[in-house]
Amino acid sequence: AASSSSSTSSSSSSLLSDSENSLYQTREKELQLAKQRDILQNSRLNAMFREEDMANRKRQEQIQKLMEEDDRKWREERKKRMMGKYGEVKSVEELVGLMDDERREMQREMDTKVNLAKAAGITLTLLEPTDESDYSSTEDNSSAAGGMINGSGKRDNTESSGRFSKDDDKTKTKSNFNPIIGDAKKSWFESEQDFDLETELQSLPQRDDDNQNNNNIYDQRNKNNNDNIHSEDPDEDGLPRVINGKLTSRQQLMGISVGSAGGWSLEVFPGDFVVHRKYGIGRYEKTVLKSKTKLTPEETAASEERRKEIINGLMNEGKSLEEIQKAVADFGTDKDKDPVSNPLAALLEIAYADAMVHVPIERAYRLSRYRAGDAAVKPRLSRVKGEAWAKAKHRVEANTVQMAEDVLALYATRETLNRPPFDPSAEGRVGKFAESFPYEPTPDQKKCFEDVENDMVWRSRPMDRLICGDVGFGKTEVAMRALFRCVANGRQAALLAPTGVLAAQHFKQVVRRMGEGTEHNFNVALLRGGMGKNTKKGRELRAAIASGEVDIVVGTHALLSNGMSFKDLGLLTIDEEQRFGVNQKERLKLICNCVDVLTLSATPIPRTLQMSLSGIRDTSTIRSPPPMRKPTISYVQEFDEMLIKDAIERELAREGQCYYVVPRISQLTEANEMLERICPSLRVIQAHGRMARGTAEDNVASFAEGNFDVLLATTVIENGVDIPRVNTIIIQNAQAFGMSTLYQLRGRVGRSDLQAYAYFFHKNDAITEQSAMRLQAMADLTELGSGFDVANRDLEIRGAGSLLGTEQSGMAAKVGFDLYMRMLKKSIRQLRGLDLPVVPRSNVILPAGEGSIEAVTEVIGEDETYLIPESYIPDAKERVRQEGAARLAESTQSLVEITNSWRETNGPLPAELQNNLKALHLHTCLRQLGIDVVGLDESTGDCILRSPGLRPRHWAMICSQLPRGAPPKGLDVLFPARFSFTKDDTEITGGKKIDLEELLINPNYSDEEEEWDALDEEEVEAMKEISSAVNIKSLSEIEISNYPRFVVKKLGKSVKEGSRVDALLKVLLPPSKVVFEKQQRDKEKAKVAAELREKRELIAKQKKEQEKLGARRMGYTSY
């Protein structure tokens, strides 16, 4: 049993193992089959992927080839587009050859343009362009390129102490200053384009195998420096440069200066925005030569005759019919080079939004640079088609009419203000005081002396005159003579200065010229900070001023304090008006009521400047520099310590001194440490406004004595520091200063015959758009006498703000400031109607002094022809006051009223006084008719009365208001040919009725006929002649035939001596009365219109406030 059981178990186990083996073998076979299937499938997949990869590679290769081909084509197209006519060049020689051909062609065209302009009476001059080659092809600006930009527009790239060029040539150029502002950097794409273009230029090969060392354009530039036929600067090769992504030649960047003898001028560079009166805002591109489209009859006849000659010449030469027909077809085209057959015109090409306009060079006066102050820097170009520009201009014109009404209303208000004029008999003392001036006055100074005398002595309304002139040009001497005139007439005068340093300097000068110890012995006092009304000195000085013990007081803002009072203030002189704020000027208005005001400024603020430009404020300008004065060379550069070191060492090497100016007191310490670090042996002293009383002045005085090398200061030295040994000024963080301050600081140097230097260092990351424009102006405006231009540029940058309480900057932005001011002048002239220039005093030079109200003797203190006898009005002050009122009566009617008041108060007029009154009546008539000189023609005996501003339209308006519409019998008028509507002189005989329509041709003077420009030129010319009339001693000194004039025939022979004044009054009284009444009506009309508009504006404002109040009551909220 045991054996059977064991055998059974063994047989069963063998059966299990055989089964397992078979299963295992089956599984192995299946796995092998699966592996074989996977291998087969993978091999098929790999083969498929290999095929796809090969196909993809082939596609990529094809795509790459297509992209490379497209890129090559695009680069070629871009190269042609960017390089223009130079796109096909293959070598440097070919490029240079093209450039030479272009230069010769452009020179030939420019000569033709200049000749055409000259034939039209126009001057045309090329202006040197900005040299942008050093920084236009990189992302860095000019300062990062390592070169400094000076005021003459030249770049200096030399090393170390040789950085500053000693070449002082004043080439007229546009400055290179080109800082990077905010996001103004070029994009990566623009930079890559410029880099590619530069690379292509560098890769241009030489054809000459022997010149392998000079294998690019930059080496060729060095090689050709001496061959440049256009540039006067040997560093300029004239080869094309990469400018704003295009290959541009230097000649294409040149600007033009165009002008006429009449006074208008225009300076523009390619890309500048301009305003055309008819078409609007455009962009100047270039000047071109084109065939004339409209020929005069003479030109047409000459052209036809010349073409006949050309055809006959071709026939005589045996040319074929086809050649002759081709020549005929070329007549009048660009292929016709004959100047007679095809007359050319020089044109300014102006780009607009929808067209290109060509303006003839002789009509460039229709263009003006676009200036709009606080408007956008890049205006939108106007469209030639459509009515948009006309509508904008119409809106501005309506605004200027309102502004003109305000201006004339202000004129009328000013004329109602009266104060006793200063006594002419004291002018002898003024002349003697003037002899103490150690220098010969410049011509502009003499003109200012005369203007101020006319305002103070020969006008009854208070003076309000601005004297604009560079620092050191002699404004202070104008103020000195005005101060002396005031105190010589027994009245007090005040001189207001913005800083204690400047006030102290003026005080010393006034004391030296006219104070105690001099022959004049006037009492002069200084009122400054620390002398308040609560201090003992302050109380004593204020009491002396109030009592009249002090004749002249010089002071700072303390003069404007509430506790200040004068006994008899006659003149307030304000130095550096732009330094006073709104509150101080409001206080000045209260002080200056019926007081003469003389303002001195090198750079008036925009609002003051605009008031002077529009005629609201009288202005005199000193532009002529003192002898031997040199312009200050200005550099604008990013802050660089090594450059500062070079500048200081350069000045110390010629035994000079330096100013170093920072904008804030907190920056003084850092600047001082920097100076000690770069120049250890430097002697530095500081000056700023927070020092103890008198410390800043003492430090400046110690520096002036030569005890220190550098004066480290804030703007406290902006005014009143005059040290001839200092001829270098370094300004740190120049972007933080205003334009007026920058200009004043630059004026601290250059006060000797040595060359002066001004360095404006800025920080690129701190520059704003307006600060960049200010620094650009300092780099551009470097000539002597540029103060008025700097103020104009400041007006352009900041805008005019509010004038007469009306915001007009937005209107100026629509048409540009220049055109706006022209339209304002036009509106004023239209409202005035009769725009005869004002004559403050007339010069009567009849025999024996007949009709003159000037002194009959040079001995000071003796009687003069216009004086009231002492026996008639015993009180001296009252007598002088009445003399001034009679002498400056605005009409004969006013003079009659004055004499009637004398009769009522003092009894019948003495016979001597009655004769004198006739002369006063005569002078009143002369001033009304714009007559500045009266004299006898010795050969004919005719009385000639010159009226420089009289025009036929004026005389027509006057005669139309006279009885029978005819001029007075015996009073003839002569107009030279240039002022008449014929080619000959025009004579209008008195007593005969005239054709008024003939004299009133084009009474509205439309823009298209450009007559308003002629009116502006007439006014300027007339005022120049009037200002010089007082110095004429005889009619033989002037070419009287060149001026409009009245003529009273045979007055010197047919009228006996002593009766000539009566004869002149007989013919002059009627027209002078018409002029006075017309001017009064115009003023009253403007005043009423201004008042009505103010009332309408007030009603509208009140209505708006009531609507807001009603809305709040109803629960509405307005946002």
Image (tube, rainbow, N blue to C red):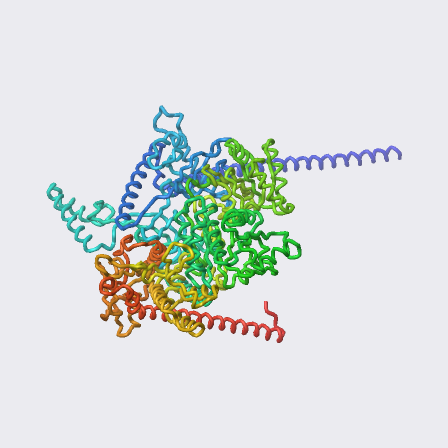
Relative to 181, say whether 214 is above or below: above
Quadrant of image for the N terminus: top right
Residue 1016 horizontal/vertical position (percent): 35, 58
The answer to whether residue 769 is visible is no
Quarter-wise, where is residue 707 in the image? Answer: top right
- Give the residue at x 71% y 37%: 23
Give left or right: position of 721 versus 820. right
Residue 647 horizontal/vertical position (percent): 52, 35
Give left or right: position of 493 versus 1004. right
The answer to whether residue 436 is visible is yes
Q: Nearer the viewer, residue 81 or 216?
A: 216
Q: Nearer the viewer, residue 876 or 851?
A: 876
Relative to 271, say whether 1010 is above or below: below
Q: How many marks?
A: 0
- Give the residue at x 53% y 71%: 1101
Give left or right: position of 866 versus 538. left
Quarter-wise, where is residue 1014 in the image? Answer: bottom left
Residue 387 horizontal/vertical position (percent): 38, 63
Relative to 240, say whether 334 is above or below: below
